Image (tube, rainbow, N blue to C red):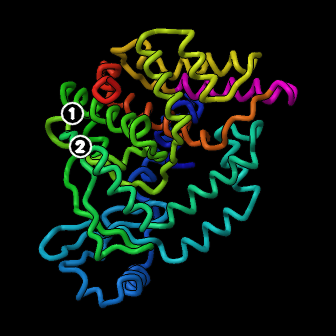
Amino acid sequence: MGQMASYVDGVVPEQHRAAYETAMAKLRAAAPTSNIAEVRALVEEELGAPLSDLFDDWEDVPIASASIGQVHRARVRGEEVAIKVQHPGITRAIESDLQNAGIVEQMAGVMGARRFDSKGMLEVVRKRFREELDYNLEAERLRFFADLHADDAFAHVPKVIDDRSTKRVLTTEFVRGLGFDEACAADEDARHEWARTLWRFVFRSNLIGGLFNADPHPGNYIFHEGGRVSFLDFGCVQPIDAPHRADAKKMHLAAMKQDVAAFHEAARGLLGTKPGRLEDAMFKYVRLTFSPLWESPFLITRGFAADCVEGFKEMSTLARKLKDHEVTPVDPNLFFINRLQFGFYSVLARLDTRVDYAAEELTFLA
């Protein structure tokens, strides 16, 4: 939650945002690290050999650390690699939290789940967090996203080193480039090309691949010359089933055509709403979030990203005031879409560039 609030516009009140972002900015790059002796022992246990036999030039000082694991640099057969290692004991710690209904309900409540199918949404939260502990699954996803975007020269997903990867250790090729803050300080042409690449990757993954990365954290992108972007960390990924994906495609195409009736029909199919005050509020909210397509070319600003968060809060507030028969039970599998949208728009807002997002989508929806 600290990581999200450190970059997602609209989560922290405007008068406190600058102070909060300064205080929490380090969470975007590094969480506390684990004892190196324990990390070494875990790697040797997982891979079944001494560290000196597994890696050349292993570096004890991690280059990054997040909530579940930390990353070390080394070499395998002469190739520079990044080794993500789970924090020792993290599985036990997370399972303890996930069994605590109060903690999970607070997490879901921040995202507006309390008034809807809270039980179903809590199970989705638990499932996604448990999946983040399985690096074998993440390796599968890395390969999936790499294959899906193989024909896009501007989207890069690091190669998995299979014989140095297990459930708790994930080794990939090492990627060098600009971090997010450096990218935001680049010239407008560079930022424009990166924003195009980011949009294509995210929505081609969603609408064509049927998977979306629900963690649009700024540290998960490495930026290169010519608009190329490397995409890291596929631990929190939400599947989109075929019926939902079909309705989502219709919404995107209707927004690009500015067809209100088709947009509402597709939104009703995706959200499962029924006529009434809540549906009206939902339509208003999703119309706002689709502005980058509806009004393309569009400049996503931090104010716009914050407006999306505020619109969601207003919709959730209305839902809490309505009677039970007036509330639509939203599919729990749509829970993480808001995390993607809020975070992704906040990332694009900091790149501060006007993009024809509709044209980018037509490259794969036409």
Instruction: Tell me which amino acid carries mark 2.
Output: Phe
Type of secondary structure dominating the magenta stretch: helix
Farthest residue to the left: give it.
78
Which residue is painted at 39% across and 37% down in the image? 208
- The part of the chain drawn in magenta is 306-326
The mark that comes first in sequence, 2 or 1, is: 1
SS at circle 1: loop
Quadrant occupied by the C terminus:
top left
Q: Which of 281 and 96 is in front in this view?
A: 281
Q: What element carries label 2?
A: strand
Q: Do the residues labelled 2 and 1 touch (CB within 8 Å)?
A: yes
Q: In this view, does 55 lie to the left or right of 270?
A: left
Q: Name the residue: 35% across, 53% down.
A: 144
**Amino acid at dot 1:** Ala
Q: Which residue is drawn at 54% across and 49% down?
A: 2
Say if 40 sits above or below 285 in the image.
below
Q: Mark 1 points at which residue?
A: 186
Residue 215: x percent and y percent? 46, 47
Q: Is residue 273 visible?
A: yes
Q: Position of residue 32 (x, y in %)?
A: 46, 65
- Looking at the rendering, which quadrant does residue 57 occupy? bottom left
Residue, disc 2? 223
